[in-house]
């Protein structure tokens, strides 16, 4: 019995020891196995520091969910969000390779080189040759009995009958001539003086001799064209009384025209009178017209920061029409022979005061960082870089706006937020100053008129209609007309139309003279001008429809406030809104009809949106 007791005791001790040695391990393994089984795909989705793995959408990085699934916006599969800083600096951020591929983000390694083709490209318009313009006047006072040219655009030749005028002064002068003619033998000086008086009124020798020989007084006298050309303005009507020297027609000789170009400050040094310029126009694709620069305006336009460049084009065949858009390429501009860093224009984002690009950091991971650069000369589709980049830097050359949007969502430095800001704050491009985090409080945002989508229509509406000068009103009408044409081009996704009308919008904005305004109206315009001009320029330069649409979002907000304050001219305009545009952040635009024609959506979604506000005409 004693021996069996010892065996039983040893067995119990062995069981206890076995439990502590093997049981704990088994339990741990069981727990671990259970936890692994509960994780999707059998992977551990916790992070090293114990934080829960978050999931995001490659196309909508603002989406952050604690578990995988479908994007609630587009339905794409969610992907793991980046974990921690991963060794990134505070200014760097990472994009997924999938997001880069979907957004077609492309990068290029820059190196030294020369400006492509050593040329300078300028945009401009055809204008009348003012040296050949003339005003047809009445050389004597009287009543217009008959006009023989009744509409503008009609061609007239020198010596052609334009009008007949009844002139009491000429009737008296004819009577003096007949009297003096009977006394010419005895008073030749008087006779000569009377004939000279009629010559001063542009009567010819044959007309004077006809009156003298017939002995009859003519009541209605003809007015003949003194020049050949095209009537550009009719300045009188039948039955009007005109004074001596009063204009009747404006006549433009379009046998030669002016090609007028705008050159920016940093391009002036490359231009001089006598340089060859090759001119092209959309009206005659594939054709080039050669001319020379004949004049460079000595005064800088302070509103657009440009100078006017002029070239003379022969126009015997009438190919060029005043108002036609043209492009001029100046070849053989001066170079210093030094190696130059150049980048495509698509790589540069311009904010009015700063020019920025995005650099990709070295390594396999797509890590980006904002870099401010100093621009030099512009040549075609390239910019010269004077500072901020060096040979070997890899920069974003396509999809720059997408990368900038990702930077803003992550609260990093971006085009309009040089200090960075909280992700999910104001709309991209809407940061116009504010607190230390780069965000505007609601009061300041409403004051400037650049506000978050949800609060946009809450902004105070100023009314400057009564004090707006007529000249400014007309210039604003041209801006609205170009804007609406651009909007329609975006609706149809017409690349040629959007290119044309984004250029027309930029040109009309340059001519909008805020110095015509005074007081609060001038202050209000100055607050809106820079942001509006900035995105109009970016819209003009954007090579793709999507790029133009993105900047159309941002130029629409200040323009809506401007139209609301100064009035839409002679027609009622509508403020439309689509909540699905701008990556579901919403977007506003102006329309001239109540029908919704969405400039941001594809054809199937063209009617998406609603009228949020009606801006009545000035009438």
Image: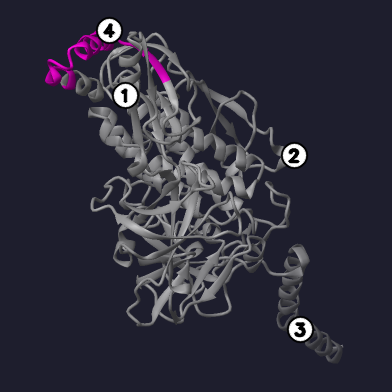
**Residue 28 seen by the camera:** yes
Q: Mark 2 points at which residue?
A: 604
As helix, strand or loop, the secondary structure at mark 1 comes to loop
For the record, the magenta segment spans 163-192
Q: Nearer the viewer, mark 1 or mark 3?
A: 1
Q: Do the residues labelled 4 and 1 touch (CB within 8 Å)?
A: no
Q: How crowded is mark 4: few (under 14 residues within 10 Å), some or many (20 or more)?
A: some
As helix, strand or loop, the secondary structure at mark 4 comes to helix
Q: Which x, y percent locates residue 41?
A: 77, 66
As helix, strand or loop, the secondary structure at mark 2 comes to helix
**Residue displayed at 74% across by 75% down:** 29
Q: Do the residues labelled 3 and 2 touch (CB within 8 Å)?
A: no
Q: Are marks 2 and 1 in contact (CB under 8 Å)?
A: no
Figure quadrant of the C terminus:
top left
Q: Are marks 1 and 3 in contact (CB under 8 Å)?
A: no
As helix, strand or loop, the secondary structure at mark 3 comes to helix
Q: How crowded is mark 2: few (under 14 residues within 10 Å), some or many (20 or more)?
A: few
Query: Horizontal placement of 338 versus 328: left or right?
Result: left
Pointer 4 or 1: first along the chain:
4
Q: Name the residue under label 3.
A: 18
Q: Which of marks 2 and 1 is in front?
A: 1
Q: Which x, y percent locates residue 200?
A: 23, 24
Q: Name the residue under label 1.
A: 468
Q: Mark 4 points at which residue?
A: 168
Disc number at residue 507?
none
Q: How crowded is mark 1: few (under 14 residues within 10 Å), some or many (20 or more)?
A: some
């Amino acid at each position: 019995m004693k021996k069996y007791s010892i065996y039983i005791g040893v067995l119990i001790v062995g069981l206890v020891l076995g439990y502590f040695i093997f049981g704990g391990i088994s339990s741990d393994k069981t727990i671990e196995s259970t936890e692994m089984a509960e994780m999707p795909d059998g992977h551990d989705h916790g992070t090293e520091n114990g934080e829960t793995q978050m999931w995001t959408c490659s196309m909508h990085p603002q989406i952050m969910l604690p578990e995988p699934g479908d994007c609630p916006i587009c339905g794409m599969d969610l992907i793991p969000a980046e974990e921690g800083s991963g060794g990134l600096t505070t200014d760097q951020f990472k994009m997924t390779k999938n997001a880069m591929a979907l957004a077609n983000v492309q990068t290029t390694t820059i190196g030294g080189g020369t400006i492509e083709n050593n040329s300078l490209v300028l945009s401009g318009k055809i204008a009348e040759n003012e040296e050949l313009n003339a005003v047809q006047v009445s050389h004597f006072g009287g009543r217009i009995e008959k006009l023989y040219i009744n509409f503008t655009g009609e061609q007239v030749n020198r010596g052609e009958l334009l009008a007949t005028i009844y002139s009491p002064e000429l009737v008296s002068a004819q009577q003096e001539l007949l009297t003096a003619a009977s006394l010419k033998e005895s008073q030749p000086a008087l006779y000569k003086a009377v004939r000279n008086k009629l010559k001063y009124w542009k009567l010819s020798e044959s007309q004077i001799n006809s009156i003298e020989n017939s002995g009859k007084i003519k009541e209605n006298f003809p007015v003949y064209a003194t020049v050949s050309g095209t009537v550009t303005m009719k300045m009188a009507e039948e039955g009007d009384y005109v004074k001596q020297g009063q204009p009747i027609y404006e006549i433009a000789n379009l046998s030669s025209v002016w090609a007028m170009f705008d050159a920016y400050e940093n391009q002036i040094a490359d231009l001089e009178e006598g340089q060859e310029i090759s001119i092209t126009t959309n009206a005659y694709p594939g054709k080039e017209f050669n001319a020379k620069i004949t004049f460079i305006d000595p005064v800088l336009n302070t509103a657009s920061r440009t100078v006017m460049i002029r070239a003379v084009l022969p126009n015997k065949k009438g190919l060029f029409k005043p108002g036609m858009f043209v492009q001029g390429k100046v070849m053989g501009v001066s170079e210093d022979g030094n190696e130059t860093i150049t980048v495509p224009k698509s790589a540069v984002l311009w904010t009015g005061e700063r020019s920025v690009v995005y650099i990709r950091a070295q390594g396999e991971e797509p890590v980006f960082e904002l870099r401010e650069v100093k621009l030099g000369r512009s040549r075609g589709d390239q910019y010269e870089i004077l500072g901020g980049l060096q040979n070997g830097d890899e920069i974003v050359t396509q999809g720059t706006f997408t990368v900038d949007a990702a930077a803003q969502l992550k609260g990093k430095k971006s085009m309009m937020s040089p200090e960075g800001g909280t992700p999910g704050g104001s709309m991209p491009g809407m940061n116009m100053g504010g607190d230390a985090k780069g965000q505007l409080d609601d009061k300041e945002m409403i004051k400037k008129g650049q506000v978050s989508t949800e609060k946009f229509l809450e902004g105070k509406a100023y009314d400057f209609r009564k004090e707006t000068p007529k000249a400014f009103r007309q210039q604003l009408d041209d801006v609205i007309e170009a804007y609406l044409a651009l909007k329609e081009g975006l609706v149809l996704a017409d690349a040629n139309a959007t290119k044309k009308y984004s250029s027309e919008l930029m040109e009309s904005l340059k001519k909008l003279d805020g110095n015509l305004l005074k007081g609060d109206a001038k202050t209000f315009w100055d607050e809106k001008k820079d942001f509006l001009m900035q995105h109009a320029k970016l819209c003009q330069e954007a090579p793709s429809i999507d790029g133009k649409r993105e900047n159309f979002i941002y130029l629409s907000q200040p323009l809506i406030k401007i139209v609301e304050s100064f009035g839409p001219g002679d027609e009622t305009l509508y403020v439309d809104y689509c909540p699905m545009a701008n990556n579901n952040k919403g977007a506003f635009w102006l329309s001239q009809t109540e029908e919704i024609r969405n400039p941001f959506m594809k054809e199937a979604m063209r009617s998406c949106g609603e009228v949020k506000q009606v801006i009545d005409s000035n009438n």
